[in-house]
Image (spheres, helix red, strand yellow):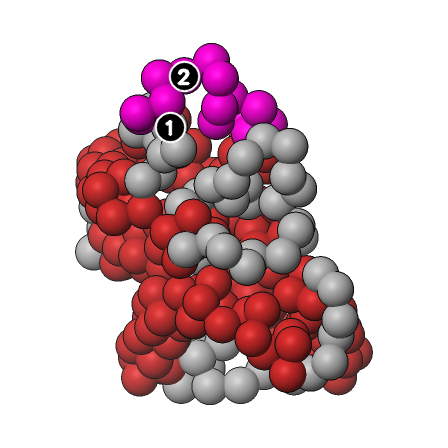
């Protein structure tokens, strides 16, 4: 009578081990960003990971200044008429949306993309799209009676980008910095603190170079770092680190003038 009992126990043990192995090895490709290693499921492996990082930093550090400098000239050259630069930004945003929908339709992936991006909006969509939103919504350093969408004629580079550029540069530098700390198994709190310090440096540079309001150094860095962490299936952290700060800047826009010391508000 003892043998059947031993056989039952052995069968149950084998079944538990089989289920345990299945569960341990099971990973959804759409798992949250906090669950995925930075280089997990990367097209191109380690080389793809390095390319993705370099592409991110170069794109968001170099292209936005060019846009703030030359958007009106490009729009004029294309014959877009009055308020040409906002029209051009809107066109680029619509092209980005259409291109991403086509990519999703066919499940296309390219070198440096992650497998889970095959069937969801990818980082390479949310980054540029977020930049277009920042260009359209970020306040410019001009008199309060003028729309920020008005022509940029007469505005300096610093006046055009005094809010938008540090928002974008924070994404360009701090997002991959935090990602690499995560890749090195640095825990959440230390890497968040490191990201916050890095973001403060970015906004300090903006304060001295672009006359960005000093008090945004207190507000924007923690907002940007916190925006990086929600595990949302639809919105990538590239989008969150741009959309959340620019919407906050939009709400704070009425305080650029009048209620603050004018010498510290960039006026």
User: In the image, is residue 255 part of the stretch drawn in magenta?
Assistant: yes
The image shows residue 63 at horizontal and vertical percentages of: 43, 71
Lateral position of residue 185 relative to residue 96, left or right: left
Lateral position of residue 147 relative to residue 47, left or right: right
Residue at 31% from the left image edge and 25% from the top image edge: 264
The mark total stands at 2
The image shows residue 231 at horizontal and vertical percentages of: 54, 44
Is the C terminus in the top left, top right, bottom left or bottom right quadrant?
top left
The answer to whether marks 2 and 1 mark residues whose Cβ atoms lie closer than 8 Å is yes
Q: Residue furthest front?
A: 154
| Crowding at mark 1 (Cα within 10 Å: few <14, some 14-19, many 20+) | many
Viewer-proximal residue among 136 and 112: 136
Lateral position of residue 190 relative to residue 64, left or right: left
Q: In whole angstroms, how far apart are the C-alphas of marks 2 and 1?
A: 7 Å
Residue at 55% from the left image edge and 66% from the top image edge: 128
User: In the image, is residue 18 part of the stretch drawn in magenta?
Assistant: no
The image shows residue 107 at horizontal and vertical percentages of: 70, 80
The image shows residue 188 at horizontal and vertical percentages of: 30, 37
Residue at 56% from the left image edge and 51% from the top image edge: 134
Measured along the vertical axis of the image, is residue 224 above or below residue 89?
above
Can I make out residue 113 in this image? yes
- Label 1: which secondary element: loop
Residue at 49% from the left image edge and 56% from the top image edge: 154
- Label 2: which secondary element: loop
Q: Residue tagged by mark 2?
A: 260
**Residues shaded magenta:** 251-264
Q: Which mark is residue 265?
A: 1
């Amino acid at each position: 009578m003892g043998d059947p009992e031993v056989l039952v126990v052995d069968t149950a043990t084998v079944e538990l081990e089989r289920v345990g192995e299945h569960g341990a090895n099971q990973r959804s490709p759409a798992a949250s960003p906090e669950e995925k290693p930075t280089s997990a499921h990367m097209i191109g492996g380690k080389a793809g990971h390095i390319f993705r990082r370099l592409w991110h930093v170069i794109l968001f550090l170099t292209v936005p200044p060019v846009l703030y400098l030359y958007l009106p000239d490009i729009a004029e050259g294309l014959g877009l008429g009055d308020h040409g630069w906002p029209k051009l930004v809107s066109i680029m945003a619509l092209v980005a949306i259409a291109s991403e929908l086509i990519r999703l339709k066919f499940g296309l992936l390219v070198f440096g993309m992650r497998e889970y991006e095959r069937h969801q909006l990818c980082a390479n969509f949310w980054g540029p799209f977020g930049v277009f939103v920042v260009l359209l919504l970020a306040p410019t350093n001009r008199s309060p009676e003028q729309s920020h969408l008005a022509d940029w004629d007469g505005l300096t580079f610093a006046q055009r980008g005094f809010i938008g550029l540090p928002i974008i540069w924070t994404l360009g530098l701090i997002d991959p910095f935090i990602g690499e700390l995560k890749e090195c198994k640095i825990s959440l709190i230390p890497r968040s603190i490191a990201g916050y310090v890095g973001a403060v440096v970015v906004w300090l540079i903006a304060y001295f170079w672009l006359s960005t309001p000093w008090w945004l150094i207190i507000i924007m860095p923690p907002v940007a770092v916190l925006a990086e962490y929600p595990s949302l299936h639809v919105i990538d952290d590239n989008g969150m680190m741009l959309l959340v700060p620019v919407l906050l800047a939009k709400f704070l826009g009425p305080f650029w003038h009048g209620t603050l010391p004018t010498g510290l508000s960039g006026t």
